[in-house]
Image (cartoon, rainbow, N blue to C red):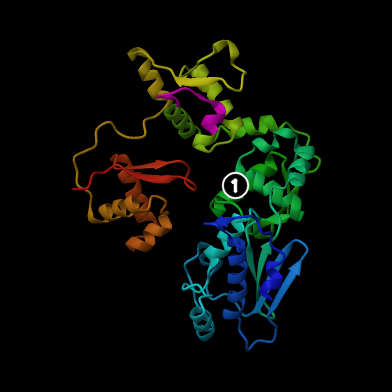
């Protein structure tokens, strides 16, 4: 069965030393999914174990239910094995992941192949778990070209999450909030707000109510995508983007494209904000007579003391110039040490490690930031922490 499944996977020419590597991470992912299907099946139930090859995907189907929640499944590292004897057998021949689930290996294998992210579903009456392994990329040339025909060439300038939503809605004809949660890297509540905004901008058409709401492509879109992109830059993190642009341009001149790549923001959004910063006197262009040239580079405009107050009002300071000489509490010190070890930890991670409530963790994080002992770089979802406190 595995040999037959492997025949559907591409085998790029990859050398490991002087020998060609016969298997890629995608092959390892398929093996892991195949073993998981057997290890986690409930053999006392009536539905049979099924491995199905479809034109654009591989689907594994096993009787039973998930023994962990869906968020825990996608997070990885959690495992409740239904058949430990089978798991031990595969482990003895070196084919079973010690954690039991191997979700990380499946996700990484598909990411290596640049295919759409695998996803899992549960069905009842009878209880069945299905794992879908798509064999197609989300941003194929055909998909991008069709989106350009509907929305215009500026569609590629949309933020990454919005482009994913449009591409998936085009491929699957309609999507829901729950379906998208596994595809975009933002909080479910933020995803709800984003979908509402995209409907308001005319990019999507929503139907239904509450959790049953589904979204589809607005094929009759007649607005201006440039205006949509420009208006969406005036959001809650507008000042944060301005700060990041200033940091990029303080020591060297950079083009809008270079800035966009460095701070991870859409090129169109960066261009709009740079124009406002030029107008406010925060930036200066190296070639004022060629403002519309793509290679135009920008620098931080050194201001006089009289203008410094005006500039400081436009770009609030992130860190106090003088850190209070205080000692953090035990809980604060523990959080600082955790974040110094892993800068990508979330509030949920900190709650689990410290046994504090969400409100308690949030309060401590805000206090540490106000004291200048902790900084947040980037957005809440994709950013990271920087610990500035000096441990004794």
Q: Position of residue 292 (x, y in %)?
A: 62, 18
Considering every residue shown, the one lying at the far bottom of the view is 44
Residue 163 makes an appearance in the image: yes
When the figure is inspected, residue 244 is found, relative to residue 68, above or below; the finding is above
When the figure is inspected, residue 92 is found, relative to residue 4, above or below; the finding is below
Q: Position of residue 257 (x, y in %)?
A: 57, 29
Snapshot quadrant of residue 321: top left
The reply, left or right, for residue 214 in relation to residue 342 is right
When the figure is inspected, residue 271 is found, relative to residue 9, above or below; the finding is above
Q: Which residues make up the magenta segment?
A: 249-260
Q: Which of 130 and 94 lies nearest the eye of the viewer?
A: 94
Q: Secondary structure at mark 1?
A: helix
For the point 65% across and 78% down, the residue is 62
The reply, left or right, for residue 11 in relation to residue 332 is right
Identify the residue position indicated by label 1 in the image: 193
**Total residue callouts:** 1
For the point 61% across and 46% down, the residue is 161
């Amino acid at each position: 069965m595995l040999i037959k499944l492997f025949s559907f996977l591409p085998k790029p020419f990859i050398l490991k030393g002087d020998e060609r590597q016969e298997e890629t991470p995608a092959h390892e992912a398929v093996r892991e999914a195949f073993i998981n299907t057997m290890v986690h099946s409930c053999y006392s139930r009536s539905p049979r174990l099924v491995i199905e090859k479809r034109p654009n995907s591989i689907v594994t189907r096993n009787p039973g239910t998930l023994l962990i929640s869906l968020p825990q499944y996608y997070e990885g590292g959690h495992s409740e094995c239904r058949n430990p004897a089978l798991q031990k057998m595969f482990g003895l021949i070196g084919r079973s992941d010690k954690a039991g689930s191997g979700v990380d290996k499946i996700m990484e294998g598909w990411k290596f192949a640049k295919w759409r992210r695998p996803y899992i579903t549960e069905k009842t009456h009878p209880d069945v778990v299905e794992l879908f392994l798509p064999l197609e990329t989300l941003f194929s040339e055909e998909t991008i070209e069709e989106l350009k025909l509907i929305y215009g060439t500026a569609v590629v300038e949309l933020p990454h999450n919005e482009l994913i939503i449009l591409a998936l809605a085009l491929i699957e004809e309609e999507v829901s909030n729950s379906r998208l949660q596994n595809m975009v890297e933002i909080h479910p509540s933020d995803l709800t707000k984003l979908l509402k905004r995209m409907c308001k901008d005319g990019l999507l058409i929503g139907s239904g109510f509450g959790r049953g709401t589904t979204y589809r492509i607005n094929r009759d879109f007649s607005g201006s995508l440039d205006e949509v992109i420009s208006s969406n830059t005036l959001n809650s993190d507008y000042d944060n983007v301005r700060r990041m642009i200033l940091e990029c341009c303080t020591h060297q001149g950079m083009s809008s494209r270079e800035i966009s790549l460095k701070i991870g923001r859409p090129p169109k959004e960066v261009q709009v904000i740079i124009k406002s910063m030029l107008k406010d006197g925060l930036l200066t262009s190296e070639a004022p007579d060629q403002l519309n040239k793509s290679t135009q580079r920008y620098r931080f405009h050194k201001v006089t003391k009289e203008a410094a107050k005006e500039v400081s009002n436009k770009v609030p300071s992130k860190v106090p110039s003088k850190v209070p000489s205080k000692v953090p509490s035990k809980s604060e010190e523990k959080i600082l040490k955790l974040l110094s070890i892993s800068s990508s930890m979330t509030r949920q991670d900190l709650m689990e490690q410290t046994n504090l409530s969400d409100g308690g963790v949030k309060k401590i994080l805000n206090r540490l930031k106000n004291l200048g002992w902790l900084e947040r770089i980037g957005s809440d979802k994709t950013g990271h922490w920087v610990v500035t406190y000096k441990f004794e």
